[in-house]
Image (cartoon, helix red, strand yellow):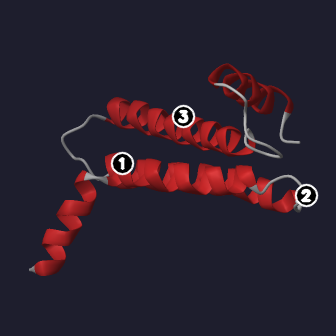
Amino acid sequence: MKYNRITRLLSKYYLQILIVLLIIAGIFVGFTACGGYIWVENSYFYGVLTLGIIFSVLLFWNKQKLSIVYRIIFSILTIIITLGTGILSYATGNAFYPDNPKSFQDLIIRILNVIQNGAC
């Protein structure tokens, strides 16, 4: 009985849990990306993609009320949100390396630079 209640509670918040985990992991990996191994950065992005696929399956493929078209659309949107959150949090964490941004404008410029050119 208690297991069903926990499962129902978690299923309500799958996407929110996913986004919080991605933000924490992305900032950590982005902050520590320079000077590290390249496989850490690659495994982070593969992990983000894998989490997006897993969470999209958990969220939408067991819903019998949704048609197959809506399941595919919602799954693709979940994967896009997952990748976007992962990349944005990675770029935000990396914007603080090697020193802090001087202003909000500098932070935005650094984030866009990381997204466009990569870390370091």
Inspect the image, locate mark 2, and give the three-letter code of the amino acid beneath it.
Gly
Q: Can residue 117 be seen in this view?
A: yes
Q: Position of residue 5 (x, y in %)?
A: 13, 70
Residue under numbered circle 1: 16
Estimate how packed mark 3 is, as few (under 14), some (14 to 19) or many (20 or more) residues with alpha carbons within 10 Å. some
Q: Is mark 3 on a helix, strand or loop?
A: helix
Residue under numbered circle 2: 35
Q: Is mark 2 on a helix, strand or loop?
A: loop
* Foreground label between 2 and 3: 2
Counting residues from the start of the chain, the first of labels 3 and 1 encountered is: 1
Nearest the viewer among 53 and 87 is 87
- The circle drawn on residue 80 is 3
- The circle drawn on residue 96 is none
Vertical side of 117 occupied by 34: above or below = below
Q: In which quarter of the image is the N terminus?
A: bottom left
Nearest the viewer among 30 and 97 is 97
